[in-house]
Amino acid sequence: MKYAFFPGCTLEGAAAENLLAIKKVTEILGIELEEIPGWSCCGATHLQDTNELLGITINARNISLAEKIGLPILTVCNTCTLMLKTAKQRLDNDDQLKTTVNKALSEANLEYHGTSGITHLLWVLLKDYGLANLKEKIVRPLKNLKTACYYGCHIIRPPETLGFEDPHNPRSLELIVEALGAKVVDYPARLDCCGFHALFPAEKAVLKMSGTHCLVAKNTGADCLVTPCPLCQMQLDMYQPDREKYLCTETKIPVLHLPQLVGLALGASPKELGLNHHIVDTKALLNKIS
Amino acid sequence: MAMEIVYRVKRFDGEKSYYQEYSIPYEKDRTILWGLIKIRDEIDPTLSFRSACRSAICGSCAIRVNSNALLACKTSLDKQLALYQTNILTLEPLANFPVIRDLVVDWENKFKHMTEVKPWLIGEKDCPGGTGYYRQSPDEFLEISNPTDCILCGCCVSECTQHTNLRDEFYEPFIFTKSWRFTADSRDNSPKAHLLPVLNEGGLWKCVRCQQCITKCPKGVRPADHISRLRCSSMNYGFTDNLGTRHAQAFAEYIQKTGRLNEVTLPLKTEGIFRTLKRIPFALRLLRKGKLRPLYFPSPIQGIEGIRKIYNRLRKEEKK
Ligand code: FES
């Protein structure tokens, strides 16, 4: 099982712990990752606002680099997934656009063919690797851990672009978390938006909203939140003291990257998974599973 | 025994709201609206809801089922039961609208925002040869084709993240669509008159990109994409002195320069020095946890020259 790995910019920065966890988990599971040489930022929902064609072309370039090494792309960030899949969907359904984009790509001696698929680690675990195989590798079932599953928008919406499951009632994340032995709590905010992409122009609203998601999770009795998107993780974890200013109440709850939770069940140490790099301390949670 | 299905309906009598359950015998290949009509006809004539065309054209039957907005006449009952794996569905009025009674919502205050974007063609352009017709090329028409499909059902409003948060400071998604529909119309003489209200009053740069509007639209209209186009248009008209523009342009610059985002300098580029100073406690917090590398500047990626050439080409074409 081998993929062209598209890490996305945040894994080189504020979500570096996610990269540690991904490397560890894929190593244990025997999933081979080849980082796409020369991949660029996907534009993170902003690039197309400056120039729509540029947004598509930059991601056509990313995809064409994966096509060159003949592998399907594996992403680990919801927004990267949406940006890449949007480009692919547009190009595969519009020959005129494909010709225009390929003319631009020829400047970089590249060509988009449409031969590489795009998938996310969550989907790989569920569909390509399979729950049964995953369960076989579990050495530390997360028995006592109550978990609130938080999808993040860009892995479910819009459905005609993402296409993995119905965005009104997805199940993939819960299925993985249950396979790890953890208990999934009934979490009403599981499909809500974290607000990451409008933090600067609408800071107060975004912090209040992401803080409320954490509060709601706490109120369900969850020990932690888990998300397949590093941007959601950052939004829910990093701003904890800032949002408490607005909400006038404690909103502390650990927020784990999906690969960290998987890694714990596979027996990796918290340090190997970068759990010491969180703003909201993860010790209480680790005590529960040890 | 034949299966019963239950509609758990949120009712409102003008003063109090409560949930009432109605059981109806299951029938195959029915719509959500079929059940409502059956309840009104056979069980409770006081149950209020709107419908007219029953063909997903008039937009009057929009409601929420299990917290998701949809057209009751277009939505298959079987599919909803399968989706939620249940025989009980919760029906509520659209969110983000005042409720008049039961499932009937009040559109009155939406017209204010609608009027602000001037949803009509402004000014007259010459009609070639005095024909009295406005001419449009196929490409010009395509530009406004998607926003023209909006049937004003309100589904996009119900779960819009930022309209839920900000109310009047962030327009309903269909208002952005309407604004774009006229901003982009080649026959219009005053595109800025449609664009400026969404930029100034509508919160154009505050959209969180949650894609709820696109997901909920029963007609395939794409308000979030129209927001992107309005943003692009506003920059082309020179309205660039705002956080949103600077943020978007920062991404474009990073990709051109190194191919990668630089998280350390991003706030500075977006907000300027003064507002960034306010983020020092935040930065220190990240630093303490090893989440920030202040001296890390991404070096240009392999193939960066190619990216720059792509930029040059597309920019040139844009100018043309
Ligand atoms: S009744 Fe007209 S759209 Fe449903």
Image (cartoon, rainbow, N blue to C red):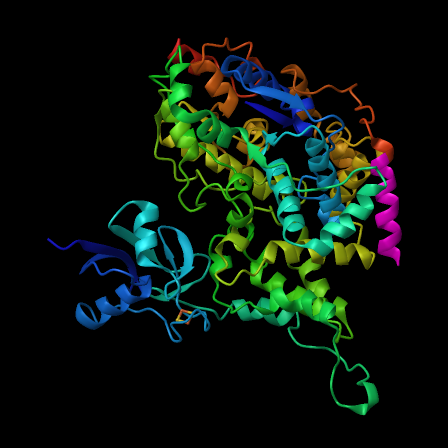
For residue A98, above or below residue A119:
below
Magenta segment includes A277: no
Q: Quadrant of residue B260?
A: top right
For residue B50, above or below residue B313:
below
Q: Give the number of marks.
A: 0
Magenta segment includes B313: yes
| Most common SS among magenta residues | helix
B55 relative position to A228: left or right: left
Whether residue B17 is visible here, answered yes or no, is yes
- At horizontal 50% and vertical 8% (from top left) the residue drawn is A269
Q: Residue A77 or B46: which is nearer the viewer?
A: A77
Q: Position of residue B80 (x, y in %)?
A: 34, 52
| Ligand 1 shown in quarter | bottom left
User: What's the magenta region?
Assistant: B306-320
Q: Position of residue B136 (x, y in %)?
A: 74, 76
Q: Residue B271 or B246: which is nearer the viewer?
A: B246
- At horizontal 42% and vertical 20% (from top left) the residue drawn is A134
Q: Position of residue A185 (x, y in %)?
A: 35, 30
Q: Position of residue B95 (x, y in %)?
A: 43, 56
- At horizontal 77% and vertical 72% (from top left) the residue drawn is B190
Whether residue A13 is visible here, answered yes or no, is no
For residue B141, above or below residue B298:
below
Indicate the quadrant containing the C terminus of chain B: top left, top right, bottom left or bottom right: bottom right
